[in-house]
Amino acid sequence: MLVKPTNIQGKGRALVASEPIPAGQILLRDRPILVYLSHHDHDGPVVCAGCFRKLSSPEPNAAPLLSCPSCSDHARFCSPNCQSSALASSHSSWVCKALTCLRSASTLSPDLRTQANFLIAAYNLSSVSPSDFSLLLSFQGSGVESPESHLLHSFILAVIALHPLPKGVEASPVLTALLLSKDKQNAFGIMEPLKDSGERLVRAYAIYPQASLFNHDCLPNACRFDYFDNPGDGNTSIIIRALHDIPAGREVCLSYFPINWNYKDRQTRLSEDYGFTCNCDRCQIEMNWKDEDEEDMDEDEQMDGPDGGWDGSGDEQDFPHEYFFMKFLCDRENCGGTLAPLPPENGMPSHVLECNVCGQFKPEEDEDSGVNEDDMLDE
């Protein structure tokens, strides 16, 4: 593998480059151990309950969509393979009954319904794949009981009372809170295609066994791509590509959110969802910059630039990472995605960049396609 797990003091588990990695190189392809739908999908069966591809209206003479034998109005499948695979795993008989209970749980808010979807998938995993469930429990997340976790646990207990799990772990308030923390700190959002307005809904969430080890950096050296609507097997896999050259031994990091978020929003999300404060190179610069400048700007001015405050003016002492945003931030309106080079071919670097949000391909403007991370950090 091009990346290997290690422990970094102050960070815990991490992935580092096991050898020099060229720009655009695919570092990891990872299949999920668990996928579950976001609540916004509750209005109808718009995705396959097996592969999570978007379902479109059948064309004339096309094979009809297949239904779940028990909940035909709520779960559809795009093929016999998806149906048979899901009915034996992710859409087992117990999941089917639990989701029916969830549809009648009128006291749960949309956010809690999404978390209930996760708990149904996780407790089902303990039954259909104990090894993957044990792996899930090994991920980061300590679990703190709360009124929300108790409410969700009461829902799970009510489901189990009506429909006992065939086998698996015994549900408890401590375990439910622990599972919720694993989800919060490790799940990747699977987004719907970008709308013209810039709005993107979360279709589903997925938890990946290896990708969960990537730590965050506000100036990442890699980014992730997913192609859930692509045909063929493995459409739910996540793909991690290097943004620029990465030397051996360097930690490989992703950004947990769009790279154009401003300092305050980044720190708030990291503190609330992941329990840490980021002290990366970029944050150390923006911490002082924001304190000095933010009070003098109105909201519109703060959003002019790619970082919600930097407008491209000023010199490198004000914002030394200008080049990073000029090269890797997608310039399509309302996108905010990250551009990564296509994988090298026959050892030759690509000069075409792909956006991981809108999917546009863009020729690389800079003739020097190899950007070394050490050079960026020394600016």
Image: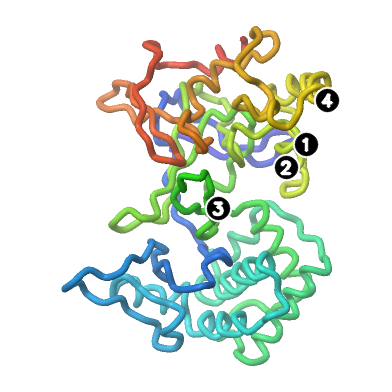
Residue density around tag 3, few if under 14, some if 14–19, many if 20 or more, within 10 Å = some
**CA distance for labels 4 and 2:** 23 Å
Quadrant in the rendering for residue 113:
bottom right
The residue lying toward the viewer, choosing from 224 and 168, is: 224
Residue type at numbered disc 4? Glu
Sequence-wise, the earlier of marks 4 and 2 is 2
Contact flag, marks 4 and 1 (Cβ < 8 Å): no
Contact (Cβ within 8 Å) of mark 4 with mark 3 = no
Q: Which residue is mark 2?
A: 270
Tell me which amino acid carries mark 3: Gly
**Residue 151 percent across, percent down from the top left:** 77, 75
Q: Is 190 left or right of 185, judged from the image as shown?
A: left
Specify the label residue 189 is tagged with: 3
Measure the alpha-carbon separation of dots 3 and 1.
21 Å
Q: Are marks 4 and 2 in contact (CB under 8 Å)?
A: no
Residue that badge 4 annotates: 295
On the image, numbered disc 1 is attached to which residue? 277
Q: CA distance from mark 4 to mark 3?
A: 33 Å
- Looking at the rendered structure, the secondary structure element under dot 2 is helix
3 and 2 marks in contact (CB < 8 Å): no
Quarter of the figure with the N terminus:
top left
Residue 163, label in figure = none
Cα distance in 3D space between marks 3 and 2? 15 Å
* Image x and y of residue 213, in percent: 59, 44
Crowding at label 1, few (<14), some or many (≥20) Cα neighbours within 10 Å? some
At label 2, the amino acid type is: Leu
Q: Which of the marked residues, 4 or 1, is nearer the chain's N terminus? A: 1
